[in-house]
Amino acid sequence: MARVFSGIQPSGVPTLGNYLGAIRNWVALQDAHDCLFCVVDLHAITVWQDPSGLRQATREMAASVMACGIDPARHILFHQSAVPAHAELAWIFNCVARLGWLNRMTQFKDKSGKDREAASAGLYVYPNLMAADILAYHATLVPVGDDQRQHIELANDIAQKFNHDYGREFFPLIEAAIPVTSARVMSLRDGTRKMSKSDPSDQSRINLTDDTDSIVQKIRKAKTDPAPLPETLAELEARPEARNLVGIYAALTEATPEDVLRRFAGQGFGQFKPALAECVAETLRPIRAETLRLMADTTALDAGLRAGAARAAAIAEPILRETQALVGLLPAR
Ligand code: TYM
């Protein structure tokens, strides 16, 4: 059985993009796989985080993930920093990955922006830590959104080079599980940009704990164009905002964008937006209630994450020890 691993940054409450691009897929994979889900706090500090804000955001993310349907009793949910094997394996991978590979990472280019010299060294080697997250468990199936595709390819390059350099097929090949209709949910303000927690405008995204009023208001104000919805997807190509809203509706109703157009073709956004808002609000109502309930007991949340970390460490440590032995490091014990 393929072992599933995925991670999410502690950006507080997840966005609809995180949900449709990744978390919903995590939930779907739960029934047939052994899964590990990780709140990646070490990745988060590659850019400055206010310490108490980070603690709060880590708990919020864990609570939201559980509220979406991840069962921490059947599977493993934990915070990355609590399992030292991630950072230890990442160091070894820092020595395997080539600068040329890291230089190609579009996410580093985007995140470091114009002032690359001022970016942290951690941001640069971020993909090596991500490879370690997955490979520390010999996980082979990684449910993510489309923006993580390049990082998964890099993880495979690292695994292959390690196996080649040390003469053993030790790390397995990783497969990214990327959804078809919601691999890239875009901003409500600009259909060419990804929906993201780092966008300064809260109007650009739906957060999983938004109440019905704010969902309705954000979707009503979402950028669109005056034309009615067309009959074919091809006609949406030059209309990224309209394309995005149709994609969200399709993902939420588990239909294809073509199905959505068949239903709404000829109608304007005055009709489509309220239908979409209702659909979003309906999906998020129970998630919001459960997140708030879980957030009311942070002691239990913290204890649950620590218990998850102990179970995760029990899998990762033997793999780390074997990696160290392959590299030629003397055993610590
Ligand atoms: P992060 O925290 O940015 O996002 C978490 C997951 O949500 C997906 N996602 C989206 N999908 C569709 N549309 C969007 N607008 C959107 N925004 C985010 C992401 O693709 C991701 O699957 N580097 C990772 C975290 C990570 C990880 C890992 C993932 C660290 N280690 C190991 C998998 C395996 C990240 O920053 O995701």
Image (tube, rainbow, N blue to C red):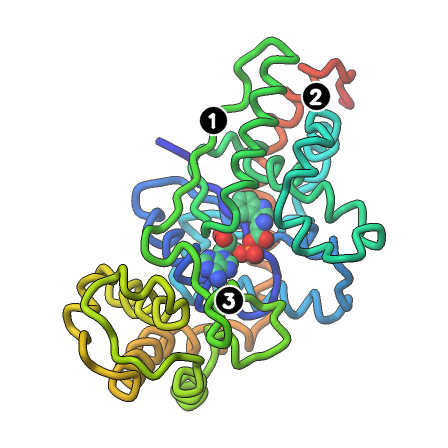
Residue extending furthest top? 167
Give the residue drawn at x 71%, y 71%. Answer: 53
Q: Position of residue 298 (x, y in %)?
A: 60, 70
Give the labeled residue for mark 2: 324
Give the labeled residue for mark 3: 195
Residue 280 visible in the picture:
yes
Label 1: which secondary element: loop
Quarter of the N terminus within the rendering: top left
Disc nearer the start of the sequence (2/3): 3
Label 2: which secondary element: helix
Alpha carbons under labels 1 and 3: distance apart: 29 Å
Give the residue drawn at x 30%, y 42%. Answer: 32
Q: Is residue 170 left or right of residue 114?
A: left
Q: Is residue 333 left or right of residue 251?
A: right
Label 3 lies in ligand 1 vicinity (Cβ under 8 Å): yes
Determine which quarter of the picture holds residue 111: bottom right
Residue 173 shows which numbered tag? 1
Q: Position of residue 199 (x, y in %)?
A: 61, 71
Is residue 293 depicted above or below 116 in this figure? below
* Marks 1, 3: nearer the viewer: 3
Query: What kind of residue is marked 3?
Result: Met
Alpha carbons under labels 2 and 1: distance apart: 20 Å
Residue 247 shows which numbered tag? none
Residue extending furthest right? 117
